[in-house]
Image: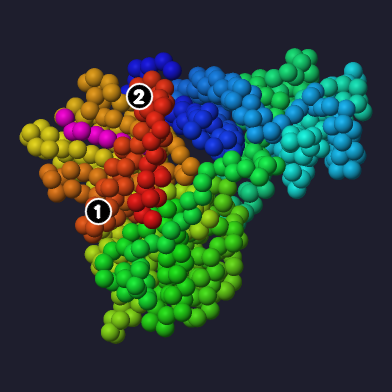
Amino acid sequence: MSLNKKRYFKRDLSWLRFNHRVLQEASDSRNPLYERIKFLAIFSSNLDEFFKVRVSDIRQIKNLDKSLRKKLITKPNKLLKAIKKEVFEQQEAFGRIFRSEIIPELKKENIYLVSYQEFSAKQATFAKKYYEENLASLEDPDMDKENPFIENEALYLVGGLKTKLLIWYKINNASSRFVKLPKEGNRHYLTFVDDILKHNLALKYGTSFYSIKISRDAELYIDNEYSGNLLHKIKDALPKRDSGQVTRTLVEASMPSGLLKKLQLKLDINETDIVIGGAHHNFKDFFGFPNPTKKNLSFEKLPPVPSKEFDGYHRMFTAIAEKDRLLNFPYESYDPIIRLLEESADDPEVTKIKVTLYRISGDSLVAKALLKAVKNKKDVFVFIETKARFDEENNIKWGKVLEENGANVLYSYPGIKVHSKILIIERTEAGQPVLYGYISTGNFNEKTSKIYTDFGLLTAKQKVTNELNQVFQVLNREIIIPKSKKLLISPFTTRTRFAEMIATEIENAEAGKQAYITLKMNSLQDTAMIDLLYKASNAGVKITLLVRGICCLIPGIKGQSENIKITSIIDRFLEHGRLYIFCNGGKEKMYLGSADWMTRNLDHRIEVITPVLDQDIHDQLNVLLKLQLNDTVKSRIIDAQQNNKYLDPNSSGTSSQHLIYKHLS
């Protein structure tokens, strides 16, 4: 990529470069074959969400009054053009990887994924019978309408007749995307349902059919969040998500130009929203790609290990009262959190439980433990964020269940999200109330805890738990502003406290003292914080960043960021933990919490970041972070060109995630 001469990478282009790193994993032959296929699915799923969310936001800028648009730094048309160019290049790479790498590797395992053009006579006969028995009834009679509605991210086939344009809904959601064809010798044959449809529809109508998919604006546009019942407004807006404005029309590359023009007219599609892709869309369905062999073609299993923090302790509260405890997901089991909640539900000395829920699983053990606590007459306060994108419906469902069973449930604040992952348990000990707290970088979700890397800190330190309790007082509308000396709480103190810590490093560097900053996060976008890091770099502060996703800071520029090094790790687990370390004149300060350095996390969300006050945990986190910073297998260099070069593309060593698992086992 060409050098960005400005101070910052564009947020959306930086995100696309993150997704390129995901695509690299699909091409990395060091990964097992079926994991490479899974990375193709992740790439596809990520890109779908990007068009549903980010591109829709950019399109909304285009709808602003021209005088307002001129005042914006972002030029929407120029940005959309750059996005389309980058997406096209990645789609081309995606196709090459699939055709030239994945398909040949499948054949080596005697797995053949065949298109309808490759059907043998035997396979064609099978395809005809399969169609008649399973698919013929799926043809949609409504598609003959003058203005048919194309569902969001559903798969369609388009065929052109002389008299009209035909569109068929391809397959219902309950059916498998892949069909096993008759086996021949040692060879296993698979095909897309798409190809079975294409084969039979061509026979039926005498014309070729081509695949299309439309992505629609998935934002929930709420009229005036600050008046009326916000929960009801969100409920009412959810059904509109699938009928939003078109943000991308993905069409098969081989579709004739004449048919494409007819399609544009029929569906009123803007040419700028058309993206040329391969013959098959919705590659996220490859999460379920069948393995017809008995071979293990996936990663070796790394089941979560029991945490050693609670060995020998009959009760969780005893262990936490003794000292702070750290949990490392997904390497360690999520069981201690479920155990803590269940113990709290049964413990007669526990009086109150307060928790924030941002994304919980559909069959949540966390929610079930809270229901048990309510049943046992505990005072349970649950703050549910109903604006957690794509989890709104599930969150609302659990909120209703908890509320109906007697929990005190509050929902989203207008204009601000509650993104913190916090828990307070109040227990009566020796006649006095004692608080136990939990602060995490990850959600209260036992399912994602198996695939997201996160830190969770359990503490009974009063100077932390008292401040944590204030956050719940804010959520419960008991106080407006928390008073915190230890915790960093957005949108109140996080930005200013981080700025002060960076200023200390600058002062120390200018005084000739040791000065460094080490940050691990998901995204770095806030320009004010980036400017402070640039200033620190120019003062001589050594800055090391580990950023999984968006990174708008441009490293390695003389006079701007020459003392800043950035790497990014994409591996089998999704890097999700946040860790912030400052030299502080040799008395190192370390923090962990839920906030990235994005403007939304610093100014528009309620976030909680805690200092790591236990020296054992401090040391352990440094060990884990060092393993990641020394990763030569899955680490990429984020440079000024955003080339995503592997630190060592030929490394035969062990990735940091495997080393961390071994370290904690």
Residue 259, quarter of picture? top right
Please, what is the three-letter code of the amino acid marked with disc 2? Asp
Q: CA distance from mark 2 to mark 1?
A: 29 Å
Mark 2: few/some/many CA within 10 Å (<14, 14-19, 20+)? some
Q: Position of residue 502 (x, y in %)?
A: 21, 40
Image quarter (top left, top right, bottom left or bottom right) of the N terminus: top left
Crowding near the residue tagged with mark 1, few <14, some 14–19, many ≥20 C-alpha atoms within 10 Å: some
Q: Which residues are magenta?
A: 540-547
Residue 190 point in image, percent of width and height:
74, 35
Q: Which mark is residue 502?
A: none
Q: Is residue 612 above or below residue 98?
A: below
Q: Which residue does the image show at 53% across and 79% down from the upper left?
A: 375
- For label 2, the residue is 639
Check if mark 2's residue and mark 1's residue have beta carbons within 8 Å. Answer: no
Which residue is farthest left?
Answer: 511
Disc 2 element:
loop
Q: Which residue appears at 36% of the width and 54% of the height? A: 664
**Residue 125, x across and y down, in percent:** 90, 33
Residue 72 in magenta stretch: no
| Residue 72 visible from this viewpoint | no
Q: Main secondary structure of the magenta part?
A: strand
Q: Position of residue 206 (x, y in %)?
A: 91, 22
Q: Is residue 209 above or below residue 50?
A: above
Which of the pair 481/452 is nearer the observer?
Answer: 452
In this figure, which residue is indicated by the disc labeled 1? 618
Residue 567 sits in which quadrant? top left
Q: Which is nearer the N-term, disc 2 or disc 1?
A: 1
Tell me which amino acid carries mark 1: His
- SS type, badge 1: helix
The furthest residue to the bottom? 431
